[in-house]
Image: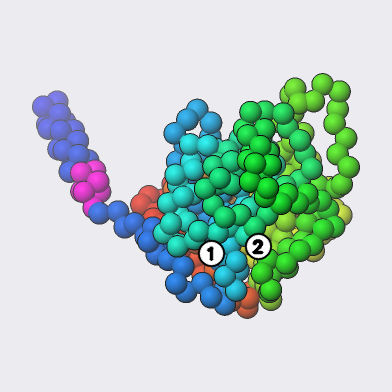
């Protein structure tokens, strides 16, 4: 009995020693490398931010893109408390002008920092869908647009525009002419998420697909309509990697080499595994930190993540 206890104590001591060793090991932080923009010329680069929420809202999505000829695009702007994270990233990149400021849909974890960005930076134009949403943060960024006389461009299915001289942007969703149901916006979470902007950026043989918070209902419709046209090297995974989204037909139509989930935690391990089992190199910002994905347009992607994985939970 006493021997058993001694063994238990030894095992416990060993566990403590091992844990302390792991904790003491310096965690490599490549933040400066992720946001080093000195090699951006001639490349299309997307930097998926790790946002830290300082409120009750989830942190949300924000991605900063640079075109091969030096234009800057931001897709989504997190919740209002994450403005500092976006500001820090832009400062690290040396960015003072945002040529294209894009909102996928008007939920607070996607447009929370829009007003602050519009007031603080020189903005080329703001691009949104036509979905209107009568909440305080939505009104505040519409007011910021009006006060600063920033051009506001509405995007819908079939629209195309250029991001700089070399990158084509195609909009697949939502269709023009939104029909609001009686009582909107009560109970509109799913309705609004399914109207997220689905937008593809193409540079030579490389492409990035941004999907907002689309749910499987919209994904299936779009996959049936567009099929192979959705094929993209890099995917911003819909709805933070949650189980509401990432249906099989959608994933298969895209066939991404690299996928990034921006979230405060692993939303659903099953979704992560569905991507990684298909051979997609899959990142989660709450684990990997900020992630930079860059290409010269040859269909190959260089990925730098801020942190290394320190455990095997996702294997
Ligand atoms: Zn969201």
Q: Assess disc 1: are there few (<14), some (14-19) or many (≥20) residues with their C-alpha within 10 Å of its C-alpha.
A: many
Residue 312 appears left or right of 273: left
Residue 262: percent from left, percent from top: 54, 47
Asked if the stretch drawn in magenta spans residue 156, the answer is: no
Residue at position x 63%, y 53% in the image: 101
Residue 76: percent from left, percent from top: 61, 47
Q: Foreground residue, 112 or 121? A: 121
Task: Tell me, yes or no, if residue 277 can be seen here.
Answer: no
Quadrant for the N terminus in the image: top left
Q: Foreground residue, 52 or 8? A: 52
Residue at position x 58%, y 62% in the image: 72
The quarter of the displayed image where residue 70 is located = bottom right
Q: What element carries label 2?
A: strand
**Do labels 2 and 1 touch, CB within 8 Å?**
yes
Residue at position x 63%, y 76% in the image: 297
Q: Distance between the residues labelled 2 and 1?
A: 10 Å
Give, as a single range, the part of the protein colored magenta. 18-25
Q: What element carries label 1?
A: strand
Residue 28: percent from left, percent from top: 31, 57
Residue at position x 25%, y 48% in the image: 22
Q: Name the residue under label 2.
A: 208
Query: Which secondary structure is most common in the magenta stretch?
Result: helix
Residue 46 appears left or right of 145: left
Quick one: label 2 or label 1, which is nearer the N terminus?
A: 2
Residue 68 got which mark?
A: none
Q: How many marks?
A: 2
Q: Foreground residue, 235 or 314? A: 235
Residue 213: percent from left, percent from top: 67, 42
Q: Name the residue under label 1.
A: 293
Residue 10 appears left or right of 142: left
Q: How is the image coloured?
A: rainbow
Q: Assess disc 2: are there few (<14), some (14-19) or many (≥20) residues with their C-alpha within 10 Å of its C-alpha.
A: many
């Amino acid at each position: 009995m006493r021997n058993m206890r001694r063994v238990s104590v030894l095992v416990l001591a060993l566990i403590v020693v091992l844990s302390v060793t792991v904790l003491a090991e310096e965690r490599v932080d490549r933040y400066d490398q992720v946001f080093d923009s000195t090699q951006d010329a001639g490349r299309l680069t997307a930097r998926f931010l790790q946002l830290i929420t300082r409120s009750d809202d989830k942190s949300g999505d924000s991605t900063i893109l640079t075109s091969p000829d030096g234009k800057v695009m931001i897709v989504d702007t997190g919740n209002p408390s994450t403005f500092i994270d976006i500001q820090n990233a832009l400062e690290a990149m040396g960015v003072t002008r945002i040529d294209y400021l894009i909102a996928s849909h008007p939920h607070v974890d996607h447009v929370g920092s829009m007003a602050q960005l519009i007031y603080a930076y020189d903005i080329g134009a703001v691009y949104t869908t036509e979905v209107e949403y009568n909440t305080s943060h939505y009104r505040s960024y519409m007011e910021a647009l009006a006060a600063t006389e920033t051009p506001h461009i509405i995007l819908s299915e079939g629209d195309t525009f250029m991001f700089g001289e070399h990158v084509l942007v195609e909009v697949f969703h939502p269709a023009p002419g939104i029909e609001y149901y009686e009582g909107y916006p009560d109970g509109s979470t799913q309705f609004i998420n399914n109207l997220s902007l689905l937008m593809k950026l193409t540079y030579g043989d490389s492409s990035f697909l941004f999907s907002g918070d689309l749910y499987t209902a919209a994904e299936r419709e779009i996959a049936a309509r567009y099929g192979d046209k959705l094929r993209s090297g890099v995917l911003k995974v819909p709805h933070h990697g949650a189980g509401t989204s990432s249906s099989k037909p959608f994933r298969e139509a895209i066939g991404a080499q690299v996928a990034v989930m921006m979230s405060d935690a692993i939303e659903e391990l099953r979704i992560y595994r569905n991507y990684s089992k298909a051979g997609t190199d899959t990142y989660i910002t709450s684990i990997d930190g900020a992630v930079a994905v860059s290409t010269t347009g040859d269909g190959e992607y260089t990925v730098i993540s801020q942190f290394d994985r320190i455990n095997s939970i996702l294997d």
